[in-house]
Amino acid sequence: MSGLVVLKLGGRVAADAVRDALARIGGPVVVVHGAGPQITDEMTRLGIEPVFVRGRRVTTPEVLEVVRASFEAVNREVCAAIGPAAQSLRGEEIGLRARRVPALGLVGEPEPCAPAAIRESLEAGRVPVVSPLAEGPLNVNADEAAAALAVGLGAERILFVSDVPGVLVEGALARVLPADEAEAALDAGAFEGGIVPKLVAAVRAARGGVQATIGATEVPA
């Protein structure tokens, strides 16, 4: 879709950042939000130890229910911040596809797709706000889900907005990090934590023809 931007919002900043981000974009936008901090906080409250593998959350049936509830809470907050133009969409109900990763439990790796519900929302002039639980249901990383949707929908750009300024390389903010260099650094274990799935997602988006930006860092193909 010409001029389409996919806006991925980290759970920690989602509701606070969305209005400013939309104002800067000024065109058709699909919002995909995470809920990582909220999920972890609720798991801690319930006495469930969070386990991550390369930025992906190991997900049992019990954890999946926490994920679902947290996504729904953040989705409501983001929609409220946007206002009447927002349209809440649940990934598992609209055809967000993912290939299961059995080693991580009920976790999937999102596949490029263009759900009809998102296209119809955009055509109606709405702002689709996607909660990234995939069919199955499977817990998918929100960064990877956003990239899969960006490629599937033929978006022009994908913007990853979080509480970090961009990608830090040897302690310095990288303004440009080509996909080949990012992938080599990932393979070498140069990054850890939440930046890993963001970089993986940005590389996939860039190679799928979508201009990718993480904070102030461009990730060209």
Image (spheres, rainbow, N blue to C red):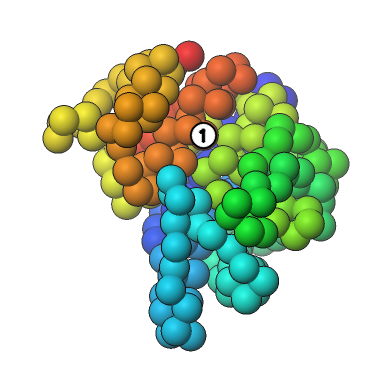
Residue 214 location, quadrant = top left
- The one nearer the camera, 118 or 38, is 38
Q: Amino acid at mark 1?
A: Ala
Q: Residue furthest bottom?
A: 46
Q: Residue at x 48, y 14 (%)?
A: 221
- The relative height of residue 146 versus residue 104 in the rendered view (above or below) is above
Horizontal side of 63 relative to 160 (left or right) equals: right
Horizontal side of 197 relative to 208 (left or right) equals: left
Instruction: Judge whether residue 186 can be spotted in this image.
Output: yes
- Element marked by disc 1: helix
Instruction: Judge whether residue 77 can be spotted in this image.
Output: no
User: Residue 183 location in percent, x, y?
Assistant: 41, 23
Number of callouts: 1
Residue 145 location, quadrant = top right
Q: Residue at x 28, y 32 (%)?
A: 190
User: Residue 167 location in percent, x, y?
Assistant: 29, 34
